[in-house]
Every structure is written in C-alpha cells, then in structure tokens.
Amino acid sequence: MAPRPLGPLVLALGGAAAVLGSVLFILWKAYSSRGRERRWDRGEAWWGVEPARLPEWDEWEPQDEEDEEPALEELEQREVLVLGLDGSGKSTFLRVLSGKPPLEGHVPTWGFNSVRLPTKDFEVDLLEIGGSQNLRFYWKEFVNEVDVLVFMVDSADRLRLPWARQELHKLLDKDPDLPVVVVANKQDLSEAMSMVELQQELGLQAIDSQREVFLLAASVAPAGPGFENPGTVHIWRLLLELLS
C-alpha cells in the first residue's frame, strides 16, 4: 500500500511552527542587539538592586544647533533565558520580578515574554519562551545567545518530571559552559517532591562537578508585591552573582 500523503492541515501546522520559530529568533535578536559576551568575574558579587537613573538637570538651557546633545551612559546588558514545561511558573516568575501581580489561573505562553530590569551596573534582559511541546523544539536556538539559563520545574508535577529532565539535559548538552539555575517551584504544595527527590529524578547528581548548576527551592507566587517573596529574592540574588 502506498504511503498516505500528508493532509493540508498537517502541512499547514508544520509550516506555521517553522515560521513561528524563525519569528521568535528574529525578535530575540532585535530585542538583544549585542552579540554574546560572557563575563565570569568570580570576585565580590554585587547583591544590591538599584534602578538606573538618568542625570537630573537643575536648569534647562536651549542649545545652539551646532552643539551636540550630551550622550547618556549606556548600561551593559546581560541575558537570562527562562525555560521550563508549560505550567511550571515561568510567566509568574517574570511578573513577580517586574513588580506585577501574577495572573489568575494558568495562562500558557504562546510565544515569548520578556522583561528588562535595570541594576546599578548593568541591565538584565529575561526572556521566557513558552513551554508547550511545539515550542520546545526552538529552545536550543537561544541557548548560545544568553549568559545564564533558568529552568523552572513544577515540583508537584510528578507525571511530567521525566519530560522536564529530558528537556533540561538537551539544553545542558547544547552548551556545556552555560551556568544553569534549576528552580524547584511550587514547594508550598503538599504534593511537592523534596529537593533530594528532585535532584535524583532530574539527574543532577550525574552532571560534571565542574559545571555551575544550582537547584533552588521556591514558590514564586508572591505573598505580597514585588520582591517580598523570599524564594524569588534568593533566585534574583544568585542571578546577579552569576552575571556580575
């Protein structure tokens, strides 16, 4: 029997997925204008968070056409990629960091979300890519463009933990030098797995000891606005240390 040709709907979906991946990559390239430049200065880490401020002018004076406007100092940029299966809490993590309340219910990301956070010495760009199955194929295209990877795991989702492990190790193999922060989210739930269980189930004990891989317990849904959640603060401080 001759093989059955692919239907128009299958072809259309395949083409749409390919276009989506290309669009995501182009948008990220436009959003992050600089090439990758890692800086692993393991000296003293800067733990504070201060918004970048523009210079204040006590008095404004009109300038001649020949005078050049003073150039504002541009902060260096650092890129953080936030990945994980759908429902692991990636969008909530970005919203909490930016001082916004989490959305009610589970709203999957059909593309990407991004947040830019200024600090004293540099700006941190966090890019979240949706965790649905059709978007995971494109994760690896972004790994080599960032400075740190944050991988979110739903600690209570025992059924899909093998999938999370598989996707995590694909990313680890893609860039052996990339620091990785694994966030064991939803630790406040009664059915959440312990940190020891997660370390074993995710295969973290088998990773090269020379590699920077961190496993942090968290429940990123905040009890209050902004950085009041201790787990989120701990993650943010570790990111600043790795990016400094």
Image (cartoon, rainbow, N blue to C red):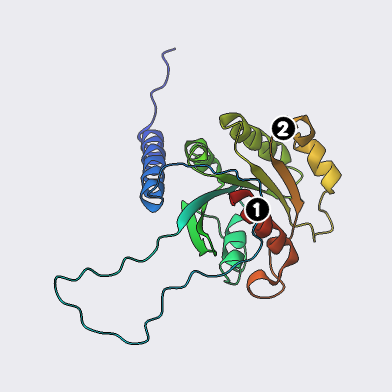
Q: Residue furthest top?
A: 1
Q: Tell me where residue 194 appears, x and y as whole percent.
A: 85, 49
Task: Give left or right: position of 19 versus 236.
Answer: left
Q: Tell me where residue 63 appears, x and y as whole percent.
A: 20, 78
Image quadrant holding the N terminus, namely top left
Residue at left offset 60%, top offset 72%: 101
Mark 2 and mark 1 lie on one chain; the one further toward the N terminus is 2
Residue at left offset 61%, top offset 45%: 41
Between the residue at mark 2 and the residue at mark 1, the CA separation in whole angstroms equals 17 Å
The image quarter in which residue 62 lies: bottom left
Question: In the image shown, does 239 or 206 lie closer to the viewer?
Answer: 239
The answer to whether 113 is drawn above or below residue 147 in the figure is below
Q: Which residue is mark 2?
A: 210
Q: Tell me where residue 210 appears, x and y as whole percent.
A: 72, 32
Element under disc 2: loop
Residue at left offset 56%, top offset 67%: 98
